[in-house]
Amino acid sequence: MGNRTLVIGDIHGCARTFNILLDVVGLERTDTLYLLGDYIDRGPDSRGVIETILQLQKDGFVVRPIRGNHEDMMLLAIQSGVFEDLLDWLENGGDVTLRNYGVQHPQNLPEEHLRFLESLPLHCVTDKFVFVHAGIDCTLADPFSASGRQHMLWDRTGLIDIGKLGGRKVVSGHSTRKLDDIKKSLKKNHIHLDNGVYLSGFQGKGNLVCVDLGTNELFVQPNIDERAGE
């Protein structure tokens, strides 16, 4: 089972679901696990999600997390000091995260967690794939330049040009897709992996998904955090 390239979409504070999915996948230290951002907000245990990621790295697992727009909103709220930036984050699920941590402001999160969030890159590139939270602006001369930052965090068009990416496929989260659409995307040049784990009760959504890019096997874990009422 080892030497797999695995990718998990947006976790959004669903720590129990995340840990169960890792068990289902059978993560090994010879695997490489990419995480597509949005670890925090909306779900009940953002702290637990980050603690799991940090522990995996400490235990010698190869985990490569990237930044999502929710991490970026939270960090902006800290760095800018502008109330409107804080309000924007709070209205997009940040209020749940603050309650989970038991603090009044995101600047009061544990230092280790803040350092982790600040260190997250906007994308990862391998020989065959580009891993990014939202999308890649292929109209730019350099799609990975600072000019493409907004696209990497917020794009919902799904438009890419693999010719501008050295033939690499794009793997992203951010925009929720039904399971059938996620399965169809596995055969295309842009793979979408966000099934809206926090959307329990919505037809075709409410799961955390992982794909093995070597085999296109899809692992689907229904949200257990919501059902547990946590």
Image (tube, rainbow, N blue to C red):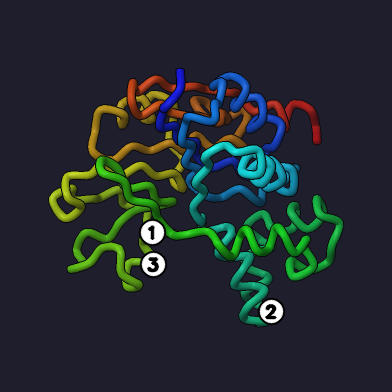
Q: Looking at the rendered structure, which numbered label has been put on residue 83?
A: 2
Mark 1 / mark 2, whichever is N-terminal: 2
Q: Where is residue 87 in the image (x, y as percent from the top left)?
A: 67, 70
Which quadrant would residue 16 be assigned to in this image? top right
Left or right: residue 168 versus residue 55 is left
Callout 2 environment at 10 Å: few (<14), some (14 to 19), or many (20+)?
few
Q: What residue type is labelled 1?
A: Met
Tell me, yes or no, if residue 13 can be seen here. Answer: no
- The residue at 62%/81% (across/down) is 80
At mark 3, the secondary structure is helix
Residue at image mark 1 = 152
Q: Do the residues labelled 1 and 3 touch (CB within 8 Å)?
A: yes
At mark 2, the secondary structure is helix
Which quadrant would residue 150 be assigned to in this image? bottom left
Mark 2 / mark 3, whichever is N-terminal: 2
Q: Which amino acid does label 3 sit on?
A: Arg
Residue at image mark 3 = 149
At mark 1, the secondary structure is helix
C-alpha separation, residue under disc 1 versus residue under disc 3: 5 Å
